[in-house]
Amino acid sequence: MKNICIVLSQLTSAPMTEKYKKEMQRIAERIRKVREFKKISQQDLASQIGISQNAYSKIELGYSKISLDRLFLIAKLLNVDTLELLGSKRRSSNNLRT
């Protein structure tokens, strides 16, 4: 968990370099895919987060920086591990059970 926080804090506090923009777009794409798979509308998720649908749309498009708190909340609301949204290769303990 400590490593996740370090990586996320670097992403959320980093200047908007091309590498940063691409990584944020990858995270945004994973958020969108999970939300669509779970058949949750942008409006519903935005309401649960406490932001407008327009603001949420900017998150999914990678146009808006996402805070650590907001990323953890989105993961919780989508019922997925934060590592899944980050695209980590590491598997959570739930995925290792047979």
Image: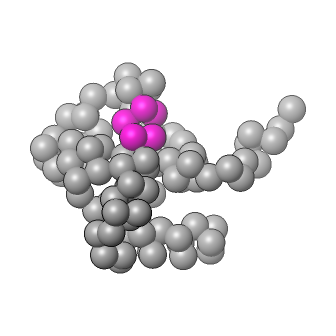
Position of 23 with respect to 66 (left or right) is: right
Residue depicted at x 38% and y 54%: 22
Q: Is the magenta stretch mostly helix, strand or loop?
A: helix
Is residue 51 visible to the viewer in this orientation of the structure?
yes
State the extent of the magenta-drawn residues as a range.
29-34
Query: Which is more toward the observer, 24 or 56?
Result: 24
- Answer whether residue 70 is visible to the viewer in this image: no
Q: In this view, does 4 lie above or below 91?
A: below
Q: Which residue lies furthest to the right in this view?
A: 98
x%, y% of residue 87? 56, 48
* Count of all numbered marks drawn on residues in the image: 0
In this view, 40 is above or below 6 = above
Q: Position of residue 4 (x, y in %)?
A: 58, 67
Q: Where is residue 38 in the image (x, y as percent from the top left)?
A: 44, 26
Q: Would you place residue 26 above or below residue 65 in this image?
A: above
The picture places residue 20, in percent across and down from the top left corner, at 38, 64
Give the position of the C terminus as an image quadrant. Answer: top right
Residue at (62%, 52%) from the top-left corner?
Answer: 88
Q: Which of 45 and 64 is in front in this view?
A: 64
**Quarter where residue 34 is shown:** top left
> In this view, which residue lies farthest toward the front?
18
Find out whether residue 83 is within the magenta segment: no
Picture colour scheme? one colour
Residue for point 47% across, 68% down: 8
Residue at 43 percent across and 47 percent down: it is 26
Q: Is residue 74 left or right of residue 84?
A: left
User: Which quadrant is the N terminus positioned in?
Assistant: bottom right
Q: Horizontally, is 81 left or right of 60 in the view? A: right
